Amino acid sequence: MNIIIEGSRGKSGTVKMITEALERRNKSVMGKITGSEALVFYQGKKNYIKRKNNRFLLDKENKDILKKYKAEFKVIE
């Protein structure tokens, strides 16, 4: 199940909160935060996303991340 968080403020905190809540319930979950320090929460770890020259296409990045991580729940902003 993909959960997409949208809005102008509070997206990263919401992704982190939902990801942590699902992990506490022993669910398989991946959470992705975008921005200048993009990262993925997966299996209790933070995995920073390396971008070349700060140029990226968010749609492509999200598509690649959704394919890469195997989880029952995927929470992205």
Image (cartoon, helix red, strand yellow):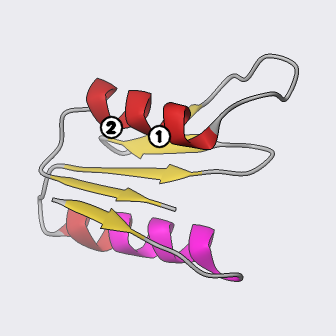
At 61% from the left edge and 81% from the top edge, which residue is drawn? 7
Q: Nearer the viewer, residue 28 or 4?
A: 4
At 35% from the left edge and 64% from the top edge, which residue is drawn? 19
Q: Badge 2: how crowded within 10 Å, few (<14), some, or many (20+)? A: some
Q: Amino acid at mark 2?
A: Leu
The label shown at residue 66 is 2
Residue 73 placement: quadrant: bottom left
Q: Which residues are magenta?
A: 9-19
Residue 66 placement: quadrant: top left
Against 72, residue 16 (above or below) is: below
* Relative image position of residue 22 (x, y in whole percent): 22, 67
Q: Amino acid at mark 1?
A: Asn
Which residue ends up furthest to the right in the rendered image? 53
Mark 1–mark 2 contact, CB under 8 Å?
Answer: yes
At 64% from the left edge and 81% from the top edge, which residue is drawn? 10
Residue 52 placement: quadrant: top right
* Relative image position of residue 18 (x, y in whole percent): 36, 73
- Report the magenta stretch's main SS: helix
Residue 1 seen in this snapshot: yes
Against 9, residue 59 (above or below) is: above
At 66% from the left edge and 43% from the top edge, which residue is drawn? 38
In what element is the residue under mark 1? Answer: helix
The label shown at residue 35 is none
Image quadrant holding the N terminus, namely: bottom left
The label shown at residue 62 is 1
